[in-house]
Amino acid sequence: MTTRSPISVARDWPVVRLDEIATKIGSGATPTGGAEAYLKQRNQFALIRSQNVFDRRFDPDGLAFISDAQASALRGVVVQPGDLLLNITGDGITFARCCAAPEALLPACVNQHVAIIRVDPARAHPGYVLAYLTHPQVKAYIESFNAGGSRRAITKGHIESFRLPLPPLAEQKAIARVLDLLDEKIIANTQMNRTLDGLARSIFGDWFLAFGPTRAMARGEKPASIGKNLSAFFPPAFEHSPVGPIPKGWRVEPLAEHVDIERGLSYDGDGLREDGTGLPMHNLNSIYEGGGYKHDGIKFFSGTNRDKHLILPGDMIVANTEQGFDRLLIGHAAIVPARFGQRTIFSHHLYRVRPAPGSPMTTHYLVQLFNSERWHYWISGFANGTTVNMLPKDALQMPLIVIPPEELVQAFTEIAQALHQQSEANLLESRTLDATRDLLGPPLVSGEIGVSEQINPSGAAH
């Protein structure tokens, strides 16, 4: 047993090496064939990479999938419920991030950039060890083991030698429960936001892609998805158009007549700032595959820009670049959130798309259109390139678009805006909870704040 800890401890807790309380510490490997051998869809096993691991949060975006045969070759690094995942290589952002493996993700393996830490439940609680490994002072302590130069790296031996204070198991559980309660609310907000987004997509798809209300009325049925005040705008019959059958009286026009498109700032790396100074810059990593805004992707830029590169909260951005040819990202859209302020810019890998003056189109309508499967297939088909796929500006101008009555577009926009505002409120609450958790974590782990008297291991408050 060792006697030194990288953090000060307010109690008379023993200090142990991590390998004294762990039953497994180890990283995986990339399956033979590399990324080219990954499956396009999940069969059984997922492959966890460093891009999926954030501090106290697992991000499934970009999760890879492997075959049973590939997983069998990695059987020594199959993730189990309760395992902790630690990034052991990476840059100053990704290195040393740590989270718990979500049980719903399993079965899964890890690659060589991620280590599994499996604690002995008789001696330690994984939630407490996670709180320790994500302690700000411990993050610096982990970085002090760096064996990889500019690209940071640590070894299994380094991890085994990590020293941590070890409270009684009941107190470990209580500390973990306090932080878990905050995590659970953050996760619930995230799930709620997915539900809100799914609801907006569902309504849009029924009204403007499947023409559900018109189809119902054509069958002599009463549409279930609209109120009485909107039924007059859905005719009970179809007519032929250049894009196929559409509700009678609706129009088909080139998208170019309804949008203004601007490409973002072309920049070099000298203007980027990792310290958060400069203007927030939305970039290719600001859009999820499939659409939607990716908050963790923001960059900061202090170089020269022009007014045309400024973008406002509520504006729509569209990805115009993608490595490879899977078209998972290119052509998808997102709405710029309010959290980064009124003055932000966007990079040349994005288009800013605004409704043209006089058009009945709205940003909320257009973002749903661009993220719909059929429209994305059509738009992304215009992309071209050799190693990098590029979407030309005229790809967003040439396609024909169905123009519903303006009253319907406005009715949908009111619904979508309300859902979006609730989503942003949930995000703001989650950021506050996240900050609260970060403030509570260090004094709990160091014993400055005791919780055994207030919260029992089951999580119930006394």
Image (cartoon, helix red, strand yellow):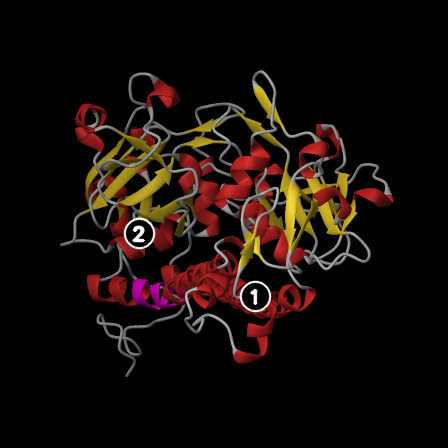
Question: In the figure, is residue 58 to the left or right of 430?
Answer: left
Closer to the N terminus: mark 2 or mark 1? 2
Q: Which of 70 and 351 is in front in this view?
A: 351
Relative to 239, does residue 31 appear above or below in the rendering?
A: above
Residue under the point 19% across and 29% down: 68
The answer to whether residue 183 is visible is: yes
**Residue 423 is one of the magenta-drawn residues:** no
Mark 2 vs mark 1, foreground winner is 1
For residue 330, say whether it is visible. Answer: no
Tag of residue 129: 2
Residue 63, image quadrant: top left
Residue under numbered circle 1: 235
Image quadrant where one finds the C terminus: bottom left
Q: Which amino acid does label 2 sit on?
A: Val
Q: Main secondary structure of the magenta part?
A: helix
Q: In this view, does 20 lie to the left or right of 302?
A: left
Q: Which amino acid does label 1 sit on?
A: Pro
User: In the rendered structure, which segment of residues is drawn in magenta?
Assistant: 176-182
Residue found at the far right of this picture: 307
Residue at 58 percent across and 16 percent down: it is 386
Residue 356: % across, % down: 78, 52
Q: Where is residue 326 in the image (x, y as percent from the top left)?
A: 47, 28
